[in-house]
Amino acid sequence: MRRWLDRIYLAAGALGATFIALICVLMVAQSIMRELGLRTGAINDIVSWFCAAAAFFAMAHAFKHGDFVRVTLLLEKLPTRRCRQLEMVTLGIASVAVGYLTWSACLFTYESWEFNDIAQGLLPVPMWIPQLSFALGSVLFWVAVVDEFIIVLRGGVPSFVRAVEERHAKGDFSSDI
């Protein structure tokens, strides 16, 4: 199960990176098209949808690899036992909060599909299509948070803590800036 979940997180991160590359391609294409006098209006809509897709698909991967901002001032001062307890509490709260985000995102996407909501921009696309990245990315993020919660409940060290410690062991403190 661990390898399967890690592959899903990695695939989601790669998908997020792919959307970032596509944003770059579209922005360059838009610049070239403007120089050629071609219309480029719908590209702005697509780029905005790709920005959301890049952010939400990359969340689970970023969370698992310690790339989220964490305020560890209090955790660094606590004894190991208290630190674990605080990690459990915060991951429990995060599981509920991200679960609510996931439920809301899925409901929002479903309602867009149910009411046949169409984009108001230059490209008349059913809104549930770009919103699907919001819903799926939220589901993956929720799974990642619950995954970490279970790891800590079982007495393990959170993956994001291990990832940061491994970077520090290699002399990479760039994430601390």
Image (cartoon, grey):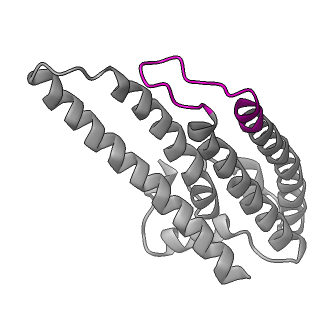
Determine whether, in the image, residue 119 is placed left or right of residue 109: left
Q: Which residues are magenta?
A: 109-127
Q: Is residue 24 visible?
A: yes
Q: How far across and down, in percent of the image, does residue 166 sit?
A: 54, 74
Determine whether, in the image, residue 171 is placed left or right of residue 128: left
47, above or below 42, in the image: below
Is 114 magenta? The answer is yes
Q: How far across and down, in percent of the image, does residue 119 sit?
A: 55, 23
Q: How far across and down, in percent of the image, does residue 7 sit?
A: 58, 75
Magenta span: chief secondary structure: loop
Return the residue nearer the eye: 160 or 132.
132
- Count the marks: 0
Return the residue nearer the eye: 42 or 162.
42
Return the residue nearer the eye: 38 or 72.
38
Using the rendered view, name the quadrant where residue 170 is placed: bottom left
Query: Which residue occupies 55% across, 53% down?
Result: 58
Q: How far across and down, in percent of the image, does residue 99 sit?
A: 83, 48
Is 116 magenta? The answer is yes
